[in-house]
Image (tube, rainbow, N blue to C red):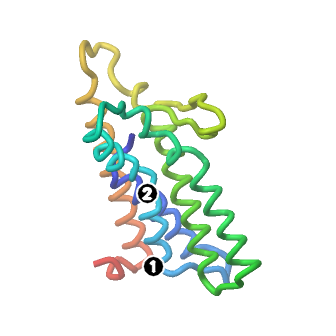
Amino acid sequence: MPFAVAHILFPLLLADMYRNFGRRGRKISRRMALFAGISGLLPDLDIPVFIVASHFGSVPITSIHRTVTHSLVLPVIGVMFFFLFLKVLRTKSMHVYALLFAFGTLSHVFLDGTINGTVMPFYPFNSEDFGLDLVSLAVPSSVLGSDLPYRFMLLAVLDAVLLVLWLLYEEYKGRIRDYV
């Protein structure tokens, strides 16, 4: 899986770009863009759940990690709350937060499925997994034994690239001081 920085920066950067280039009247605040970034990390809350569960017995990580939280369940819940807040409760900004939650969690599933490994998007209804695992394509085929150091290096490079892109974008827009 990509590291936490990538899971935060990817939706934050996209939400921030929408904030600056989106349609007039539908802008999102800096706080909302930050919420999208934090939502991008939420599916990995199953890791602390695994750590706690492993203290109570022998629980394989595959029974907890990349199951419900890495499926389309969280994005669908976010979309449901979007319509609830928009149509039923008619709240001013909560519907935007619900949509950004759906976007952030969906971006997490997208990154995990394309960058490193596979995800089960239709879990718990279907446990078939999908993914491109682009990191494995970039790892040298001459590596014998563990390819883990190469995987970590590539994921760290992804974090660095996203961070530099975000900083350059904010500097370009003249808003770097918003985050400093």
Please report the residue visible at 51 percent of the width from the left and 38 percent of the height from the top: 113
Amino acid carrying label 2: it is Leu
Residue 19 position within the rendered picture, expressed as x and y whole percent measured from the top left: 55, 75
Q: Earlier in the sequence, mark 1 or mark 2?
A: 1
Q: Residues within 10 Å of mark 2 (few under 14, many from 20)?
A: some
Q: Is residue 64 left or right of residue 48?
A: right
Amino acid carrying label 1: it is Arg
Residue 134 position within the rendered picture, expressed as x and y whole percent measured from the top left: 46, 32
**Mark 2 — residue?**
42
Residue 121 position within the rendered picture, expressed as x and y whole percent measured from the top left: 60, 40
Please report the residue visible at 56 percent of the width from the left and 36 percent of the height from the top: 120
**Mark 1 — residue?**
31
SS category of the residue bearing label 2: helix
- Front residue of 50 and 142: 50
Q: Which mark is residue 41?
A: none
38 shown above or below 44:
below
SS category of the residue bearing label 1: helix
Q: Is residue 158 left or right of residue 15?
A: left
164 shown above or below 49:
below
Please report the residue visible at 47 percent of the width from the left and 62 percent of the height from the top: 39
Image quarter for residue 163? bottom left
Please report the residue visible at 51 percent of the width from the left and 45 percent of the height from the top: 70
Q: Is residue 34 left or right of residue 160?
A: right
